[in-house]
Amino acid sequence: MPNSVSKSTTRRRTRSKYNAIPTEVDGIRFASKKEAARYVFLKGMVTAGKITELELQPPYELYVQDQKICRYIADFRYKNAEGGEVVEDVKGFITSTFRLKQKLMRAIHNIEIAIV
């Protein structure tokens, strides 16, 4: 008799690379509880009139000498009380890839990313 091995067809829930738990708020799926909580906080700031033009997941194309290097997608972008643009990224763990994109954002777009 041949030795048969059966594989389970049910998927085991695996943890994300950084143990982030996806969370949904207002029908929007966030990558982590921390990012969802930041969204709720910023939404309150909009309601209070302290910030305006709140955007989620704004993309930035990063080109060097007409060559596309990569795309950076921030978590949030908004205007503060003084009218200045703020770009935020919620991080539980800062990777070398993020550090590189942060430097590219500063060099190409003159944008400092606020890490929350």
Image (cartoon, rainbow, N blue to C red):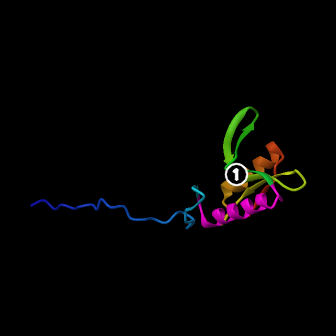
Out of 108 and 52, give the one closest to the viewer: 52
| Image spot of residue 88 (x, y percent) | 75, 56
Tell me where residue 59 sits by quadrant.
top right
In the rendered image, the vertical position of residue 68 relative to residue 80, given as above or below: above
Circle 1 packing at 10 Å, graded few (<14), some (14-19), many (20+), is: some
Of all residues, the one furthest to the top in this rendering is 66
Quarter of the image where the N terminus is located: bottom left
Quarter of the image where the C terminus is located: bottom right
Q: Is residue 95 left or right of residue 19?
A: right
Of all residues, the one furthest to the right in this rendering is 82
| Image spot of residue 6 (x, y percent) | 23, 61
In the image, what residue type sits under mark 1?
Answer: Ala
Tell me which residue sits at (77%, 57%) in the image. 46
Instruction: Give the number of callouts.
Output: 1
Tell me where residue 98 sits by quadrant.
bottom right
Out of 43 and 9, give the one closest to the viewer: 43
Q: Is residue 87 left or right of residue 96?
A: right
| Image spot of residue 62 (x, y percent) | 72, 41
| Image spot of residue 64 (x, y percent) | 75, 37
The secondary element bearing badge 1 is classed as: loop
**Magenta stretch: helix, strand or loop mostly:** helix
In the rendered image, the vertical position of residue 94 relative to residue 104, given as above or below: below
Residue labelled with disc 1: 74
Out of 92 and 69, give the one closest to the viewer: 92
Q: Is residue 31 magenta?
A: yes
Q: Is residue 5 magenta?
A: no
The segment highlighted magenta reads: 30-51
Tell me which residue sits at (55%, 66%) in the image. 21
